[in-house]
Image: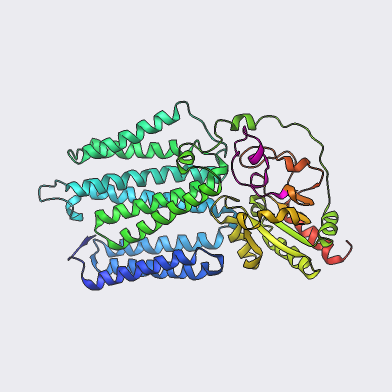
Amino acid sequence: MHELAPINPWVALAYLVAGICFILALRGLSSPASSRRGNRFGMAGMAIAVVTTLLTHELANPVEVLGAIAVGGVIGLVMARRIAMTAMPQLVAAFHSLVGLAAVAVAAAAYLNPLAFGIADPSGQIFTVSRIEMGLGIAIGAITFSGSVIAFLKLNGNMSGAPIILPLRHLINLGTLAAILGLIAYFTLDQSPWVFWTVTALSFAIGFLLIIPIGGADMPVVVSMLNSYSGWAAAAMGFTLGNTAMIITGALVGASGAILSYIMCRAMNRSFVSVIAGGFGAETSAAAGGAKEQRPWKPGSADDAAFLMSQADTVIIVPGYGMAVAQAQHALREMGDLLKAEGVTVKYAIHPVAGRMPGHMNVLLAEASVPYDEVFELEDINNEFAQCDVAFVIGANDVTNPAAKTDKTSPIYGMPVLDVEKAKTVLFVKRSMGGVGYAGVDNDVFYMDQTMMLLGDAKKMTDDIVKALGSGGH
């Protein structure tokens, strides 16, 4: 595919409209209430960009191109219909990997046939600025691909969520990054194949090396960070292809992903550099994963929980990844409705890194039609736990662990957490006492006097509480 003529004003206008649609999509996705509208704007923008590009370029083989679009569309439709909400984080990671791989493929095609892309003189010498764009694009794309593959394997359970610490990892990473940048600079002087392919290989390697030492507790930041990388990779390739739509879209995705990563790091009281350099708590995670001390705890039942919550004035529900795994959000919303019918004030407390991707809990609660005005972020509700009667924690561990405030040896020390231990009564839904959170540390809340442990599948336990509330036997 190559351009027949310079971009005319109508094409520029179409790409501008597509860019505006992407901006409106990002704005819509900032809130669950407007997320559907945001998705529609994103779809419209992409449709405009794709159709405009196809109409203004000569297709080497229209059948192959349109066939590929059709195959990709069918695969995407099937995946969207079949994917479970619990698998959404790994699906996002997989999509990021494909964006990175696409950037690598485009850069490789441009390098192998630069005249077809209009980035070389008649002798085949690639323009200096195009070499820089190509080098950065393939480096960012390869890092995005390999890093996203590791993130997918960790999120999907194919690889341990615990940090994998390599000896001298910081020295190795810095050395590899320096070599990549040095070779890109040298590529501007010498376009030999060994330079191009060495940059590619090193970039694939550093993607693995950067993500392997990052633990599961940092996965939401990793997902948003990789989202940012995929955007910058697309923008770099947009310059190589001379495609305004790719530049606009890539820059929007890259900038928004970087801002989101920064916001999430602030929410975790961590620096962005410390996370991408190996994740927080990596050095102490091994100690944290040791044998657990046997301590007394108080068991409870669904009937006990129903009675305590029905007698309360205020109940704050704290959802976590365990709720997502059990698909308990619909039962949880039904439980909340029954409590509200009895005059109980019900609120939902969301930690910014609960789950496995940014906004994971918000998405699940929105899917279950939980009213948006009942859902509160950590900073807006944390001071209310001291006044609430019952904190109902369902499948959350790390984000409610007071060790983050008291234990300097804990891998989560310094991360702001929800102060559930300040509630008069804590009901903690957990599959068993043997498991720990994704960060691999035990939670002192389990063993406090005011805590009642409700062990079992989160959905079944919530269903049983709903039955108890509905029967009036409490």
Answer with left or right where residue 444 lies relative to residue 248: right
Quarter where residue 334 is shown: bottom right
What quarter of the picture does the N terminus occupy? bottom left
Colour scheme of the picture: rainbow
The answer to which of 156 and 288 lies nearer the viewer is: 288
Main SS of the magenta part reads loop
Q: Residue furthest left?
A: 122
x, y percentage for residue 426? 77, 50
Q: Residue furthest top?
A: 167
The answer to which of 89 and 258 lies nearer the viewer is: 258
Q: Residue at x 20, y 49 (%)?
A: 129
x, y percentage for residue 469? 83, 63
Quarter where residue 181 is shown: top left
Q: Residue at x 67, y 49 (%)?
A: 396
x, y percentage for residue 147? 44, 43
Q: Is residue 89 visible?
A: yes
Question: Is residue 408 shown in magenta?
Answer: yes
Q: Is residue 369 visible?
A: no
Give the vertical position of 155 relative to 305 (above or below). Answer: above
Give the vertical position of 103 relative to 170 (above or below). Answer: below
Question: Is residue 264 shown in magenta?
Answer: no
What quarter of the picture does the C terminus occupy? bottom right
Q: Residue furthest right?
A: 473
Quarter where residue 314 is shown: bottom right
Q: Residue at x 56, y 56 (%)?
A: 359
The answer to which of 467 and 79 lies nearer the viewer is: 467
The answer to which of 259 and 249 lies nearer the viewer is: 259
Q: Residue at x 35, y 39 (%)?
A: 203
x, y percentage for residue 63? 30, 64
Find the magenta span and give its range. 398-420
Answer with left or right where residue 132 lies relative to residue 70: left
